[in-house]
Image: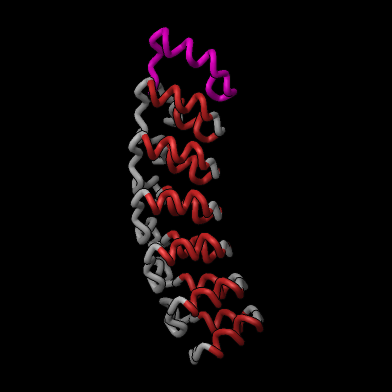
Amino acid sequence: ANMEGHDAIVEALLQAGADVDTAANNGFTPLMMASGRSHDAIVEALLQAGADVDKAANNGTTALIMTSEMGHAAIVEALLQAGADLDKANNDGATALIAASQKGHCAIVEALLQAGADVDKANNNGGTALIAASQKGHGATMEALLQAGDDIDKATDSDGATALIMGSSRGHTAIVDTLIQAGADVDKAMNNGGTALKLGGRYVYTAIVKVLKKAGAKK
């Protein structure tokens, strides 16, 4: 019933004593499914019935991670008010903040940060929310993360890429410019020696190369 948004049916089942945290074979609970489909009233009913807000599915995702990725701001607020663990991560190490940043859901990113989310927490590859936002070209989200004090030069564990290198390699000129203005190390290199300037040149992103050289990039 919660998959289809049948509020009255869900209410009746809960009143009849249905287990609010019964999970499907993949570990998804009614709260996760209602959150992912933006069924606000059902989410509220499940929370009031005592649903475990932090219960994780088989892949480690939670209702907060799922709804942050989907962009349902009202449900994110409801889950936060219910005490959801801000920094709980899925099996890949992604938190709600990383998931929202990757999708560019700036309002949700700001809500998570205001609630105290760890801005520098990284996934299993060492990727942070800032790196995810830079890679995807989400400028407003990236600025919110920078204002929250994100470590601008933090690099991934897998290849040593920073937010600046990611932005440069994807051709996001405005992202590169913003990161430079915020103090990013223009010459920091990846594990293989690649830099923002080298990658910008390799992919013939002439505007990015120009911005980087103007900022003093030499490598």
Residue visible at 43% across and 48% down in the picture = 96
Q: Nearer the viewer, residue 77 or 136?
A: 77
Question: Does residue 170 belong to the magenta stretch?
Answer: no
Q: Position of residue 113 (x, y in %)?
A: 40, 54
Q: Position of residue 163 (x, y in %)?
A: 47, 70
Residue visible at 41% across and 35% down in the picture = 57
Tell me which colouring the rendered structure shows. secondary structure
Question: Does residue 18 belong to the magenta stretch?
Answer: yes
On screen, residue 6 versus residue 113, left or right, reads right
Q: Position of residue 106 (x, y in %)?
A: 52, 54
Q: Quadrant of residue 205?
A: bottom right
On screen, residue 202 versus residue 192, left or right, reads right
Is the residue 161 above or below the residue 43 in the image?
below
Q: Position of residue 18 (x, y in %)?
A: 41, 13
Is the residue 22 above or below the residue 155 in the image?
above
The quadrant of the picture occupied by the N terminus is: top right
Q: Nearer the viewer, residue 217 or 145?
A: 145
Q: Which residues are magenta?
A: 1-21
On screen, residue 127 versus residue 4, left or right, reads left
